[in-house]
Each structure stands twice: as structure tokens, then as C-alpha cells.
Amino acid sequence: MTTKLALGSLAAIAKTAKIPAYERSKLSPGIVHFGVGNFHRAHLAVYLDDLFNLDEGHDWALVGAGVLPSDHVVREKLKDQDYLTTVVEQEANKSEARITAAMIDYVEPQNAAAIIARLADPSTRIVSMTVTEGGYFIDPASGKFNPSHPDMVHDSAHPDAPKTVFGLILAGLKACRDKGLPPFTVMSCDNIPGNGHVTENAVAGLAELSDPAFAAWVRANVAFPNSMVDRITPATGDRERSVARELFDIEDNWPVFCEDFKQWVLEDHFSAGRPAWEKVGAQFVKDVAPYELMKIRILNGGHAIIAYPAGLMDIHFVHEAMENPLVRGFLAKVEREEIIPVVPPVPNTDLNDYFKLIERRFSNPKIADTISRLCLDGSNRQPKFILPSILDRLHKGLDIVGLPLVSALWCRYCAGTSDSGKVIPPNDANWGRLQSAALEAKVDPMKFLEMRDIFGEVGESPIFRERFALSLKALWTDGTAATLQRYLDNAL
């Protein structure tokens, strides 16, 4: 018999899952988090839960916030179970469940006045976010803030009734300043190079559109720490809810399944204090950049390498892709020959050992991460995870063969059908544009590279253009499996 997840049922749930060692009623808010999703609940919320279990930091509890219509559903799911979450940590030979209680409230989504009031409350000392790589209003090719985006134009014209996370944060900071309160820290937890700098440019850049003096105040007084976050966390579906019931007798509206591994490296740069996360495994360093670049190039880039060939060969799960010798071999060859050699040294880290860890993590059959999830949002992910490695190699005069094939595989995938003819559903905000360009590229490969906002300088490189065209032609003529084999045989 299953037990519905709720504060009142924790004693019964303790028979099958680890429950909090602290009393939730004794927590008080300290962090407002935008973008309450699976990754946040498997990462930041878990680090807080670990700290609270040490009987420390109980004044740093989470309050959720959101700006999307879908956030209403999220709030109701969590509110129905007292904002508790079942986190199932899985390795190949084990599955363990724990209940986290780090979230104590969730402000009504899209209620600007209520969210701003919570941000300007003296208890709010950190505002964090997981809004995906594409949620920062930056130009993919240049990496710079895009002030002409319609949402930014709206928020600059309506600073008291903003629609975006950054407009709300700006309004909250202004309210803090007007009250004479110290500004809260703004902390990105997204996979973006220099995520703190990118966030600062979005917040201050928005302010500069209407109030340059306030923008200068933001840059001078608000902390935007850079960080590197890592934990593979697939989406929740009926499978995950069923496993929570069958293995742990827990009825959870929205359980989170994740790998056992997690990592968090961040700068110790906070405006108004922070929890003692170093006591529960977080690593504070002076410079996050080496760790961040390593992770983005090797892990996130690795996801992109396996995603599109697997998708074109109708492979469903990530671990199944790693069981395919062509996909696994493709990943290893591109990483070892073209990516790892241009990743700068990382303190106390062997990059080849790090890649071996990535291979093991990708191969975890318990995670059931899907290839379709890895294929999402390629127009934002390719410029961040793949093209920078290409650009580094071009600048160093190094050859490129596997990386142009990665881009060609993405192009072939965007044409909208797998090698078997199966229709690939849209999975990018720019899908219409991508599919049109990809279909034109079947005849003229340069049509895909004309999207300069995506490819930037890389798309102008003669060697990249040549290798991309050869790879794309091979994919259309011979298919994905044969093309991968040619690459592995050094015959592409």
C-alpha cells in the first residue's frame, strides 16, 4: 500500500526512504529560486537538505517562484504534498530514496507584485535560478546580452510590472535599495560559461535600457557568483512515478530521479551571506572558469555528440546509446582527439580520468535519461557546447573532422526524420527555421551555416564549411551508422 507524500506521513515513509532529520516547521526563508524543476530539486535543494540535516543553516530555506504559465501546475503539484520531494538517487547496482523538505513555500507564479514583495523581504539574501541555457536573452553567436528581445523591451517599458525573471529581479533590487536594505545575491545555476557574468549582463543590461544610474548601482553592489553545477537528472514521467510507488511505496506527484553523483563549484562572492555549503560537498574556489569549461566542453559537449546520431538511429535511452559501439566509439574519438586537447588544465584534475567518469555516468542504466531530452534546444546548446571547441581548434591551427560531423548530425536531425523515416517532433523554439534550413542544406549544405547568429565565426571557416558539407552529404547518402563507421575508420 502506497503512502501519499506529505509532512504528516513522513513517519510511515521512513520505512522505505530517508526522511529529514530536521523539523520543517523550524525552517525560515532565505533563498528565492526561479525555475523550480527537476535539476534544481536534485541539486541546490539537496545541498540545502544535507546542510539542514546537519542542524545548520535553518534560516536558508527555499521559496519557489516562476514566470511561466506552466509554473502554476508545478506549484500545485508541490503544494499538494507540502512542497516535499522524493529524490531517488540511482547507480547501476542500487536505488535509494530520500525526502527533501528544503522548500517551504512557492509564490503564486506570474504575480509580479507578490514576487517582488518576496524578493524585497529582508529575509531574502539569495535569489537563484535555473531557467535553461536559452533563458538569458543572449545572442548565441556573440554571447552578449540582446536588449532588442521583445521581453526585454517590454520589461524596460514596464519596470513595475515585469514579465521576466530579470525584470522581477531588477524590481526586487530597486525595492531593496529604496528600503535601505542590502542587495541580495543573484546566483545562476545554469550550464552557461561565466553564468554569473551572463546573469549580471542580463540584469544590469535590462536596467541600462531605462535607468543607467541604477544599472551602475547594480554592477557596483550586487554579487553575481559564477558557478559550475552538475548532476544528470532526466525528466519525470509515468515511469518514475510508478517506480516511486513500486519500490518505495510513495505516492509523489513529481518525484525526481537522478544519478548518485553531484558536483557544485562556485565563487565565494555573496552580497548578504550564504549557507555553509562547503560542509556538504560544495567546492568554493577563486576561479570557477577551468572547472566550468571542463564540464561544459566534455560533459555537455559529450551529450551533444551522442544525442543526434542516437536520435537518427531511433535509440531511446542514453545508456542504450552508450551500448552501441558506433555511438560510444564516436564519443570517445571526438572527445580524446578534438575536445580534451583544447581544454585548459584544471586544478587537481586529470581530464582523461574525468572523461572516463563521464562515460560511466552516461552508461548508467538506472537513470533512464532519454535521447530526446539531450536533443532539446540545439540552437542554444550547439553554440555553447560544441562550436567553442571548434573555434579553439581553428584559432590554434588544429584539424577538425569529428566536430564538424557533430554539427552535420544536428543539421540532419533538424530535417525532421530519422534514418528509418520516423518523424522527429519539434524540440527547439526555432524548429521551423531550423527544419527549413536543414532541408535546404540537403542540396546546399551552406544554407544551414547561413544562420550566423548560431554559427558565428565558425560558419565562415573554409575548413569547417568543407568538412561540414562532406559529413552532411555522407549522412544523407549512406546513413548515420555507415558515416560513423567511416569516421571511426579514419575514412571520412
Image (tube, grey):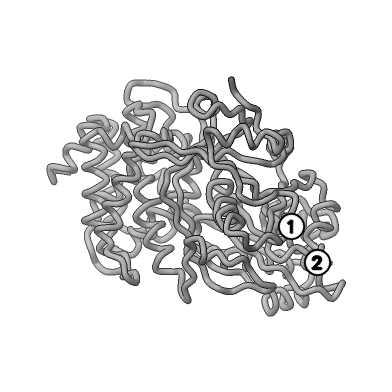
Residue hosting label 2: 122
Q: Which residue is rendered at x = 79% and y = 71% of the image?
A: 211
- Across and down, in percent, residue 3 comes to 63, 26
Query: Is residue 59 visible in this depiction of the protein?
Result: yes
Disc 1 target residue? 29
Q: Residue at x 64, y 37 (%)?
A: 10
Foreground residue, 37 or 88? Answer: 88
SS category of the residue bearing label 2: loop
Towards the viewer: 28 or 129? 28
- Measure how far apart labels 1 and 2 are at the Cα level: 10 Å
| Residue at x 44% of width, y 23% of height | 423
Mark number, residue 163: none
Dot 1 surroundings within 10 Å: few (below 14), some, or many (20 or more)? many
Whole-percent x, y for residue 435 in the image: 47, 35
- Between disc 1 and disc 2, the foreground one is 1
Question: Which of the two discs, 1 and 2, labels the residue nearer the N terminus?
Answer: 1
Q: Quadrant of residue 50?
A: bottom right
Which image quadrant: the N terminus?
top right
Q: Amino acid at mark 1?
A: Pro
- Location of the C terminus (image quadrant): top left
Toward the viewer: 98 or 408? 98
Image: 399 above or below 322: below
The kind of residue tagged 2 is Pro
Q: Is residue 134 visible?
A: no
Badge count: 2
Identify the residue shown where x is 70% and y is 77%: 221
- Residue pushed farthest bottom? 220
- Residue 40 position in % (x across, y down): 58, 49
